[in-house]
Amino acid sequence: MKVLVALSGGVDSSVAAAELIDAGHHVVGITMRLWGGESDTGCCSVADVDDARRVAQQLDIDHLVFNFSDDFNTHVVDPYVRAHSEGFTPNPCIECNRHLKFDRLSERADLLGFDAIATGHHARVEMVGDRAFVHRGADPAKDQSYVVHMLPQRELRRTMFPVGHLTKAQVRDRALALGLRTAEKPDSQDVCFITQTGGREAFLGARIPFRTGTVVDSGGAVVGDVPAIEMVTLGQRRGIGLTGGGPKRYVTAIDHGTATVVVGDEADLDGDELAVGNIVWAHESYTGDVMVQCSAHGAAVPARLDGDTVRWRRPQRRVAPGQSVVFFDPTDSYVLGGGIARRP
Amino acid sequence: MDRRSLVAVHDGYTYLDHAATTPMRAEAVEAMLPFLSEQFANPSGSHRFARQVRKSIDEARDDVAEVLGCRPGEVIFTSGGTEADNTAIFGTLDRRGGVALCPAVEHHAVLHAVESRDGRLVGVDTAGRVDLERLATALTDVSLVSVMAVNNEVGTITDLAEVSRVVRKFAPAAIIHTDAVQAACWLDLRAITPHVDLMSLSAHKFGGPKGVGVLVARGASAFAPMLVGGGQERERRSGTHNVAGIIAMATALRATDTERDAENRRIAALRDTLVDGLRAELDDIHETVDRAFKVAGSAHVCIDGIENEALLYLLDEVGVCASAASSCASGAMEPSHVLAAMGVSNERARGALRLTLGRTTTPDDVSRATAAIVDAVHRLRKGRAA
């Protein structure tokens, strides 16, 4: 097959390309230029493009760079900023996968005569008849099925995750054995367009006006204020304008409309259920026992799914609205569907 | 060596990116070889080996001056076009103060230099020519005006006599610089030199090697040097001479000058065949600039309904090397600032294709490229419609 592999400049996609070559495919490497602004998080930078190109040279495959920065702004950065200004905490990596890697890129690949695209995600696509399922990757600590859970069937059928069956250690061993320069490169962790030095606050502060928020206790009494309601997240304990000394208090609710932050005890952080919107099902809709994962690196916990409501077996920390909520089967192996946490 | 022998290893491929770089002339390669072996001395020395090399550099300078229509003492050897452009702009501002001005369609070596010193940009017309009326009203406090002789993306020629007339009238003390990097193959540089104070050239655009160029500095155009040290080039550009590069550049420039008229006719005919062929075979294709305003080697079209990144991939796959706008450091295609300044919509600019012909281009290349482009465009449009 003719396969277009997305080379990010990291070790996983490097080894993905090597795996495809081993399997006898005709492989072409491509790096997407997505974020045109400042970056120091080790993703999508010019240095990463250099690494990707050098890996492609080592593997003796062609390497191209596609500039999708306009689409990235439209589909990832602008919605990210807008969501924050409306009180949501979005997951931009998922939107990037949804709109850039598995839409813009796969469509381009199609147009250029490629049979499939491949990425270095730690996940697996398993076919049951003609139905594709996203399974967790072989390495539980590195599994990324959460960030590709929403891929539609037409994308999954033309997508390959060549390192999904490997552990991270195996990936690095493979890269070392091949002498790839990315073998010991650290994983990128953060959102590529947020700098480590300035953080989310500097990024959002340059793009939206921050509103002062009023901090109240569970009885409604005003106890302080915060300079930016947009920067407050559920469960936050520091930087909420409270003097020290008293009992530990946490952000237990945020009313974005009235710019009010409610603080309370740790016990107030938990909830019994979670409302989910914009659900995308892998196949048919599902009601029953599920395992639910609410963040990229979080563990899945058991719950019962009832329409668009998740009822936890045991109370769980409330989930910030805007976060992706992914439903796995009761054995926690494959994706049933997923959606976005709604505002309570 | 015959004219194609240097690129014979690429037989079966069609190279239409001569504005990016053009293959070295065989005589230029030959001329530089002794200076990579027995003629190794540093020309700034005083012994016989040095004197020999010095003589070759002096002769090369005479050759370059003759082709450019300036005095040998006005020729400064640099590491290329970017150094020459940067020196012209930063060196003039550092010496004279004031404001630098350039059209918005300049090469980044000029544009970014001017912008980095809070310079002034002036607009262009739909053909990419600087708007002389706006230029005339924008010259307050301007100490340097930089206008390219030929645009690297779309091939538009600037009437530097006109530019000079306006600048001399409204800002008589201002220095005029031209980036003539894209001009050497197509225009008689002797006709440009009298209208400017500073001029930049780059050897690899006319059959010389990469890494060597010229800054012509005439008359009153004293500037602060960017590189100081051993005082070479009359203190205007320190650093040991790139001897082999300079010799090869002078050889290539001489040969280019001799063949220019004949090549202009031959290549213009090939370019016309190429563009007319594409227009005959494809709907919704737009010639960006009227050929009357362009150099012979430049074909630039915008093709509706396709993205040039995809088109260039398909062309590359069948051995046709072309380009779109300029590339950034990562190798990604950047939206063209030239087309934007000319008022071409983003939508249309996405289908921009730059085909630049040169000395090695043959009728075969033209027919192969035409067929490949037509085929690729049909395929992309069909895929999009599907």
Image: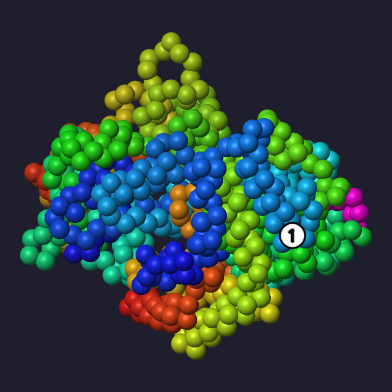
Give percent across and percent down for residue A174. 17, 39
**Residue A25 image point, x, y percent:** 18, 59
Give amino acid for label 1: Glu
Residue pictured at 32% horizontal, 57% vertical: A62
- Does A186 lie within the magenta span? no
Q: Nearer the viewer, residue B87 or B380?
A: B87
Asked whether, in this view, residue B311 is left or right of residue A297, the answer is: right
Q: Quadrant of the C terminus of chain B?
A: bottom left
- Going 31% across and 24% down the picture, which residue do you hit? A266
Q: Mark 1 = which residue?
A: B66
Query: Which residue is painted at 41% across and 13% down in the image?
Result: A246
- Circle 1 crowding by C-alpha within 10 Å: few under 14, some 14–19, many from 20: some
Please give the range of residues in magenta.
Answer: B170-176
Q: Is residue A263 above or below residue A42?
A: above
Picture residue at 59% right of the left edge, 45% below the top:
B243
Comparing B382 with B244, the one in front is B244
Report if residue B198 is visible in the image.
Answer: yes
Residue B259 located left or right of residue A85:
right
In this rendering, the answer to whether B217 lies above or below B380 is above
Residue A204: x and y, percent? 52, 40
Of the pair B288 and A271, the residue shown nearer to us: B288
Q: Position of residue A299 (x, y in %)?
A: 20, 35
